[in-house]
Amino acid sequence: MTGYPTRIDFATAAEIVREIAGNRMLKAERVPVTRASGRVLAEDIVSPIALPPFDNSRMDGFAFAHASLSTEVPTALRLAGAQFAGLLQDLHVAAGECVRITTGAPLPRGTDTVAIKEDCIEEGGSVRVPAGIAPGADVRRCGEDVHAGVRVLEEGQVLTPARASLAAALGVASMAVTQRPTVAVFTTGDELVEPGLPLAPGQIYNSNRELLMGLLRAEGLEPTAWPTLPDDPERMAAMLTDAAAAFDVVITCGGVSAGEKDHLPGLLATHGRIHFWKVRMKPGMPVLFGDMDRALFLGLPGNPVSVLATFLTLGRELLDGLQRRRESRPQWKAVLTAPWRKTHARLEFLRGGLGSAADGRLQVTPNAADASHHLRAAADSNALIVLPEGAHDYRAGDVVDVIGC
Ligand code: AMP
Ligand code: MG
C-alpha cells in the first residue's frame, strides 16, 4: 500500500481529484429544455432569434406615432383599433390615430410610442394623450435584451432556472448537457443501526447516510444507498466491487482511518488504485481517493462533520470534474465576530453562522463545538469557515474565507 501521496495539503488533494475526474468526464447527452435545469451545459448556446423578437409595448395603454403628438397640450387621437398580446393584427395606424395595446403586444405598423393607460383619458372614439411623452416611450425594442447570433450560454455553465428559461425564451428546445454521474453510497460500521430500530448498548444510529444522500440530492443527483457494510473485509469487498462495476462514483464513509476495523484503504489498494490517502485538513484528515473498476472511489471519514466538510469540498470537486463544470462554487469573505484560536497546523473547515451585519458586511460566527462528531453544531451552522494551514490566533474583525453549507 505504498506509492501514493499521503498527508498532502488540501489544494493538492483538490487538484488531484479535479484532474482525475476531469479525465473521466462523462459523455454529453441531449435533453429537452424541460429537463435541463441544474445540468451542466456541454455546448455553447447561440441565440437563434433576438429578444424581444419584435418591438412591443412595455405597458397597457395606447400606441401611436410620436409625430402625431402636439408638444404642449394633450393631444386627442382617434382610436383606430386594438392590438393585444398575440398575433400581429393587420392594422395601419395613420397620423392622428392610436390603437389600444397591452403589455407584450407587437407595435402595429405606423406606431413607435406608447402612452400608459392610466395617463390617458378615453372620450368616445378618441383618446387624450398627455404632453411630454418622449419618442419611443414604453416600447421594448427588438433585440434590446439579446441580439440574434450571439453566444448567450457557455459550455461548462450550470443551467440555473434563469439560464434554462433564457434558452426557452430563445426557442431552444433541447441542449447538450453532461450526463449525471451515477453514485453508490455506502455507510460502514458494525455499530450502525437504522433510525426506527431499537438501539442495543454500543450501537448508534446511522446519520451519515441521510447526510450523504441529502448532499448528493442537493447536487441534483439520484444517488443509490447500499445496505450498511459490516466491518468485514470480504463482505465489504464483494459489495464494493459490485458497485464499482456499475456506478460512476462510489462514496463510502467510515473505515478509512488507522483502526483495526478500517479496511477500506487496504481494499482499495487490492481491488483498485489509491490516488491519495490522508489530507492535511480538519475535519476529514483520513479521506481516501482512488478508483476501482469503472468507478471513482471517495472514502470519506466516519465522523459526520468530516463527511460534511469532505463532501462539500473534495466530493463536489469530483462531481464538478466529471461533469466538466467550469464555474467555481461560491465563496465569500466575511468578518469574524469572535476570536478563534487555531492550535493545529492543518487547514480547517470550521462550522459557523454566516449573516450580514448592520453595515452590510458579511460576518461569520464560529461555532465553539468544533469536534468532528459534533453534529448539532453542524446542524446549527450555514457555513464552513476556511482557516488556512498553520496555527494562528484570529481576532474578532479578521477577514476569513467562507463557503456555504
Ligand atoms: P470510523 O472511521 O469508521 O472509525 O468512524 C469514525 C466515527 O464515525 C466513529 O465514531 C463511528 O461510529 C462514526 N460513524 C461512522 N459511520 C457513521 C454513520 N454512518 N453514522 C454516524 N456515525 C458514524
Ligand atoms: Mg467504522
Image (spheres, rainbow, N blue to C red):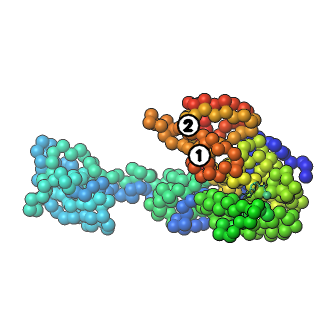
What element does badge 2 sit on?
strand
Task: Check if mark 2's residue and mark 1's residue have beta carbons within 8 Å.
Answer: yes
**Residue pictured at 69% horizontal, 41% vertical:** 348
Residue 302, x across and y down, in percent: 74, 55
What element does badge 1 sit on?
strand
The first of marks 2 and 1 along the sequence is 2
Task: Residue 241: tell me if it is visible.
Answer: no
Q: Please, what is the three-letter code of the amino acid marked with disc 2? A: Ala
Left or right, 354 with respect to 256, comes to: left
Q: Nearest the camera: 374 or 133?
A: 374
Q: Nearest the camera: 220 or 259?
A: 259
- Cβ of mark 2 under 8 A from ligand 1: no
Q: Which label was assigned to residue 363?
A: none
Q: Is residue 285 above or below residue 233?
A: above
Farthest-out residue, front: 201
Residue 394, x across and y down, in percent: 63, 31
Q: Nearest the camera: 157 or 83?
A: 157
State the residue position of label 1: 383
Residue 389, x across and y down, in percent: 72, 35
State the residue position of label 2: 334
> Which quarter of the picture shows residue 95?
bottom left
Quick check: which quadrant has ligand 1? Answer: bottom right
Left or right, 47 with respect to 343, comes to: left
Task: Residue 263: tell me if it is visible.
Answer: yes
